[in-house]
Amino acid sequence: MLARQSRAIVSHAWPILIAQLASMGMMVIDTVLLGHHGTVDLAAVAVGGGIYIAVVFALVGILQAVAPTVAHHVGAGRDGEVAGALQQTVWLALALSLPGMLLLWFPDPILALSTIEPAVEEKLRAYLRILACGMPAALLYRTFYSFCNALRQPRPMMLISLGNTLLHGGLAWTLVTGGFGVFGEPLGAIGCGISNMLVNWFGCGLAALWVARSPGLARFRPFADWQAPRWTTMRELLRLGLPMGFSNFVEITSFTLIALFVAQLGATAVAGHRIVANLAALCYMLPLALAIATLAQVGQAAGARDWPRARASIGAGLLLAGGLSTALGVLLWLAAGPLVVAYSSDPAVRAVALALIGYIALYQFFDAVQTIAAYALRGYKVTFAPMLVHTAAFWGVGLFGGWWLAFKGSQPMGVEGFWLASLASLVVAALLIGGILWRTLRARGDGDTA
């Protein structure tokens, strides 16, 4: 059974991985374009992008409750309830887009956490306000994305993600550089923001069209007999989704908000951190893809009360993610020099980035284990306890511990202190969430149907 579940996870995960890498490719494009355009623009997008990602993925985490909900319905043979779960999540996405837009339009409470150079802050605020205009599209797209993955239909979303990245590459280059003067003045960070916003709406439209017209989803009739908001369904989505969203927020901010604190060290430190953060995010796409596929397998098995199949899926996910992520860490270490050169032409920025890459090479295994364990628990609809672990590990050990190592230790480490603490936080998370998963598995023995 382990081999069969491994094949199923790999078959499901590779289109997700390509889709995730394509989405991350948009960030890489921004970083590379701005790395050769100007350090101030790169620093503005480094900080602004961190804020945007933290806000979006906190809200997306809530909406991801549609995945275990739909997976359980399918596993239990309740096909008639699948469309209602999607429609209620769409209503929730629209409701959540308003506070998301306000946070991006008025980021003052977040920016007050650190001192930012005036030139960087000016570009950062304009960049965030442009991204705010694409917030509803971003949340709706991720709703459709989670829905399709729960039904093990990832390939169309992969194609949409690839198309989005290609479109963004051409549009962002044109706006950032001015297209050799043919298309007006270079817009730098502002051009990246405009391109991201437009591509979000384009991708959302394509995803909605596919969900509505797909033959593979026709039996679920996703948009038929459209429901008004229903509090009972919405309450269950929020019960699952709020801890998931907060876990996402904690995990992302423990890494991305480092840029706010590092901003005190100057634009060079922020830009070097941005490069390494990009590489870390790219590496994370591998265990994340395997974790999303594992969640779908575990959720459908749990819905059918097939506990042996659920455990086999978890074992396969852990083996695949742990082994592949370890190999990826080794490759990252060996290719550190050429990767950094590709990102920036500034020798000082390169030096900062090279000093940090070893940390993300080391933590790949632990990141893979905690990610698979957390998503497997989501497949069981267990979300609150992992949220507590993430909060203690990523904010307590990672963010606060990193701040102390960076600025307050007997020998302040600067930006390296944050990355050392991040490594420690992932070790703690892997151990504690792995323990919760182990207890959950023991509570659901072969004869347990509770």
Image (cartoon, rainbow, N blue to C red):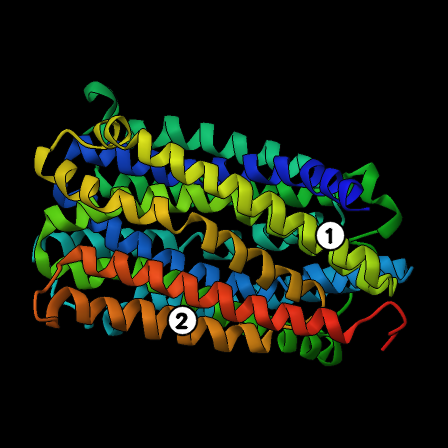
Judge whether residue 97 can be spotted in this image. Answer: no
User: Is 277 above or below relative to 239?
Assistant: above
Q: Examine the rendering and report whether any part of residue 215 can be seen.
A: yes
Residue 83 located left or right of residue 177: right
Question: Vertical placement of 301 versus 163: above or below?
Answer: below
- The percent position of residue 181, horizontal first and vertical second, equals 19, 21
Helix, strand or loop at mark 2: helix
| Quarter occupied by residue 249 | bottom left
**Mark 1 vs mark 2, CA separation in Å:** 26 Å
Q: Nearer the viewer, residue 353 or 405?
A: 405
Name the residue at 60% across, 35% down.
158
Crowd class of label 2 (few under 14; some 14 to 19; many from 20; radius 10 Å): many
Q: Which residue is mark 2?
A: 393
Q: Is residue 50 left or right of residue 321?
A: left
Q: Quadrant of residue 407?
A: bottom left
> Could you tell me residue 206's position as x and y percent?
62, 39
* Residue 178, percent from left and from top: 22, 27
Question: Which residue is located at x 60 percent, y 73 percent?
Answer: 436
Three-letter amino acid code of the residue under disc 2: Ala
Figure check: 409 above or below 128 = below
Dot 1 amino acid type: Ser
Q: Which mark is residue 313?
A: 1
Q: Looking at the image, tell me whether mark 1 or mark 2 is earlier in sequence order.
A: 1
